[in-house]
Image (spheres, rainbow, N blue to C red):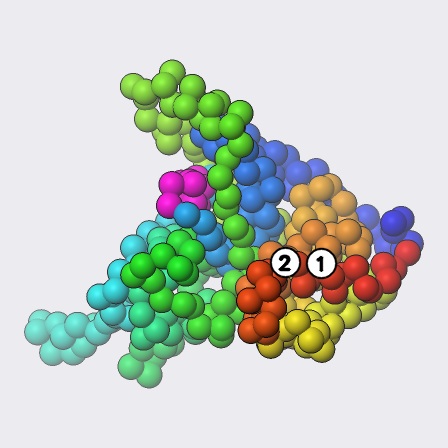
Amino acid sequence: MEAEFSQERTDLSELSGAVSRIRENLGKIIIGQSEIVDLIIAGLLADGHILLEGVPGVAKTLTAKLIARSIDALFSRIQFTPDLMPSDVLGTSVFDPRTAAFEFKKGPVFGNIILIDEINRAPAKTQSALFEVMEERQVTIDGFTYPMEAPFMVLATQNPVEQEGTYRLPEAQLDRFLFKLSVGYPTLEEETQLLTRQHQHRSEDQLEAVGAILDKNEVLACRRLVRGLHVEAKVIEYAARISHETRHSKSLYLGSSPRASLALINGAKSVAAIDGRDFVTPEDIVRVAVPVLGHRVILTPDKEMEGSTPADVIAQIIQKIEVPR
């Protein structure tokens, strides 16, 4: 699809260079998972949160840590457990006898890149503590509101829900994640390469080879570029049709929200920018459709029993909608 507009083109050379350096940074340790890495970078550029799901041992946490190390910003890691309380995440007011007043002590969520490990191991009470900060980038405690410093991004990992000792995330919280990405097993060749590299560098700390690529101001500048990318009216309508059809599909008990439609456009802008284009195509919408919509829809019970997945239904919906040209 060709861009049919006469506006001034956006120079994405610096953004493309930064993306290439981040890819190279992660490639020092991570083998394969190129699409996962690109979509995490896209989430960062789109000012969105990312949920990584996969069985233990497939480098979900490591990938998130490496992304955080690539940004010169305040990084915080929170290990979610069944006994974790909201105050352990957000912070709490502590009485100071010297001033005879309560002072707010910020929790670990106050940072720029927040890694929440095994997010589905904490109960609903703790999950709800994230609702405001993920959506509004602020925390309200005891009647006072504390804004988060930009950029603010949550990178969360979770094991599949059928594992023991986990809690299902509320739909309202899932809707706050821009992408949900499934991290699978490596191929035989990738796993062999991984073992070989680990054997050759067994005496070195490989994480030390990963340094910061961007600072906070550069991330914000890249986000402004991404927001300014051109999207034709027919591409916007295409994204809206996909989201709209999820609400009328007989295979889905719950369709996607308008927030999902916004996420489709924002995610598509980011992947277009990563590919070096200053305009969005329908193919960009299709590329992000499953990561954006898959965790926002719920299958009907009969479709679940048939073994269908949200990705299958979304693919069928896309198949039925005419692609704009």
* Residue drawn at the location 36% of the way across and 70% of the way down: 127
List the single residue furthest toward the left. Answer: 97
Q: Residue 103: give x, y in percent of width and height.
A: 21, 72
**Residue 321 left/right relative to 194:** right
Element on which disc 1 rests: helix
* Secondary structure at numbered mark 2: helix
Q: Position of residue 13 (x, y in %)?
A: 70, 38
Does residue 199 sit above or below 124 in this rendering?
above
Nearer the observer, 74 or 270: 270
Mark 2 crowd level (few <14, some 14–19, many ≥20, 10 Å Cα) = some
Q: In the image, what residue type sits under mark 2? A: Ala
Residue 49: tell me if it is visible. Answer: yes
Residue at the image point whose x is 71% and y is 42% from the top? 275
Magenta run includes residue 181: no
**What amino acid type should be assigned to the residue bearing mark 1?**
Ala
What's the residue at 55%, 67% (across, down)?
A: 305
Residue 111: tell me if it is visible. no
Q: Write the residue at 55% across / 42% down.
A: 37
CA separation in Å, label 1 and label 2: 6 Å
* Residue found at the very far bottom of the displayed protein: 143
Tell me where the magenta segment starts and ends, as one range. Answer: 56-66
Q: Is residue 64 magenta?
A: yes
Label at residue 311? 2
Residue that badge 1 annotates? 315
Up-down: is 74 above or below 131? Answer: above
Q: Are marks 1 and 2 in contact (CB under 8 Å)?
A: yes
Looking at the image, residue 23 sits to the left or right of residue 318; the answer is left
Mark 1 residue crowding within 10 angstroms, few (<14) / some (14–19) / many (20+) = few
